[in-house]
Image: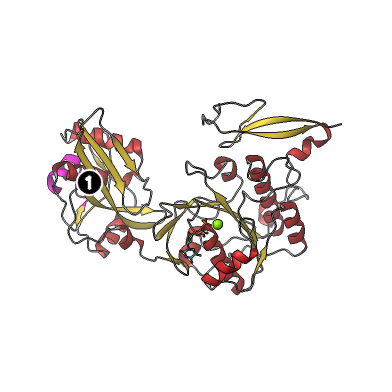
Amino acid sequence: MAKTRSVFFCSACGFESARWLGRCPQCEAWNTFDERPFTLGGGASAARPRPAPRDARGPIPLAAVDSAHVSRMRTGMSEFDAVLGGGVVPGSLTLVGGPPGAGKSTLLLQIAARLASANARIVYVCGEESAAQVKLRADRLHAHAGVLVFAETNLREILTVLDRDVPGVLIVDSIQTVWLPEAESYAGSVAQIRDCTQALVEFSKRTGCATFVVGHVTKDGTIAGPRLLEHLVDTVLYFEGEASGEYRILRAYKNRFGSIDEICVFAMRDDGLHEIENPSELFLAGREQRPSGSCVVASIVGSRPLLVEVQALVGETSYGTPRRLANNLDQARLAMILAVLERRAGLHLGTHDVYASVAGGLRMTEPAVDLGIALAIASSFRNVALAPDAVAFGELGLSGEVRAVSAASRRIAEAQKLGYRTLFDPGHYRDVADVIRAAL
Ligand code: TYD
Ligand code: MG
């Protein structure tokens, strides 16, 4: 008889171990180990089903591969299509992640309705809500033309039914609610999520059905088993920022069919998500007079230029070690900029708390934001506002030099379009101390 025992693996990176560990030796995360039954003997292969071979004919010349049928489906939401790299790719699997209430179900239902009205067969698997709840939502969005709902969570059952009549697009809401009977653990466990994703990848590639999968996020803001899923799927889209405000930002973290970091900004209204076509105007607080500690930065997000407002607050430390907090910015980058300001521009920030943040909830990671952060900090420290039409971009080096960044002309063009004409950029300045002297 088959013997059952347990294996444990890390929900963050998938590292497997024979016993429970407090800390993962591979990714060094704490408390991420999950237990999963594992059947020895006859059932061993059932514990981890292998995907069926995709092409049993053996190697074929690349030139002979038929790619003519790969035509992308347009959803009609132009910004969303752009995030995907130009539309939905048949046979691809896209993971849509985000915190509860971000708008994942809303977005996918809207897309489903748009694609269905373009004559594609769309199946929406609702594992989280009843079919009636999905109908209520669709009424609100005026979006039910031709969408088929499938209220089932057994993925084996779902795929068997769909295999008989393959849809053009399959939406699974969410990956945490579906389960495979052969994976002997509860729905939502890392083992189930991994096996279900694998089964869906195999189904999409074999049938050419484009699949969207909703993934919830854990407390620390990552999709459960993120690294595990990221390399299985073709595209990872993630809602970032606050789920409470009106605006939602969707960003491509990985895309096999387009560029990463592409974003799409939506406004959540009573009748669903609406695309915002000029997000630059949104991320600037729209003030006539800028207060001290604020600097507009011309950045590039994905492939588009975008103006964002960086804010800083500097105050004397009243107790203990100074606090340095970066919100939507890289903490290590902030520490480096503070060190450069202290040593190369003579700003004595050592006894001050510094808070730096990007307004509007967009996460900024490119080094071209450095100079803007430095100016916002210097402006708050001196309590002097920058000129209302000032805009900055440029990377800071450790010796205080302002380094050139990519796409300078596109950044400048975007800034000028919105009326920002006083430029603090690598084309005009070589050193951060010069910039601060000129700006404040
Ligand atoms: P939802 O799409 O269910 O989020 P998720 O699937 O990511 O958990 O809903 C997002 C929020 O948006 C929810 O709190 C209700 C609100 N909402 C609107 O404001 N307008 C709408 O038209 C809809 C459908 C939802
Ligand atoms: Mg939902």
Q: Position of residue 395 (x, y in %)?
A: 29, 43
Question: Looking at the picture, does residue 230 appear above or below residue 420?
Answer: above
User: What residue is at 37 percent from the left and 52 percent from the top?
Assistant: 361
Question: Looking at the picture, does residue 14 appear above or below residue 241?
Answer: above
Left or right of residue 190: residue 79: left
Question: Looking at the picture, does residue 95 appear above or below residue 136?
Answer: above
Q: Which segment did they paint magenta?
A: 424-440
In the depicted view, which residue is nearer to us: 85 or 329?
Answer: 329
User: For the view shown, which residue lies furthest in the right direction?
Assistant: 1
Question: Looking at the picture, does residue 403 appear above or below residue 299?
Answer: above
Left or right of residue 211: residue 432: left
Q: Secondary structure at mark 1?
A: helix
Left or right of residue 8: residue 184: right
Ligand 2's quadrant: bottom right
User: What residue is at 33 percent from the left and 38 percent from the top?
Assistant: 333
Residue 69 visible at all: no
User: What residue is at 47 percent from the left and 41 percent from the top?
Assistant: 220
Q: Position of residue 416 (x, y in %)?
A: 24, 62
Report which residue position mark 1 lands on. 376
Where on the picture, by quarter, is residue 35?
Answer: top right
Residue 96 visible at all: yes
Q: Is residue 425 magenta?
A: yes
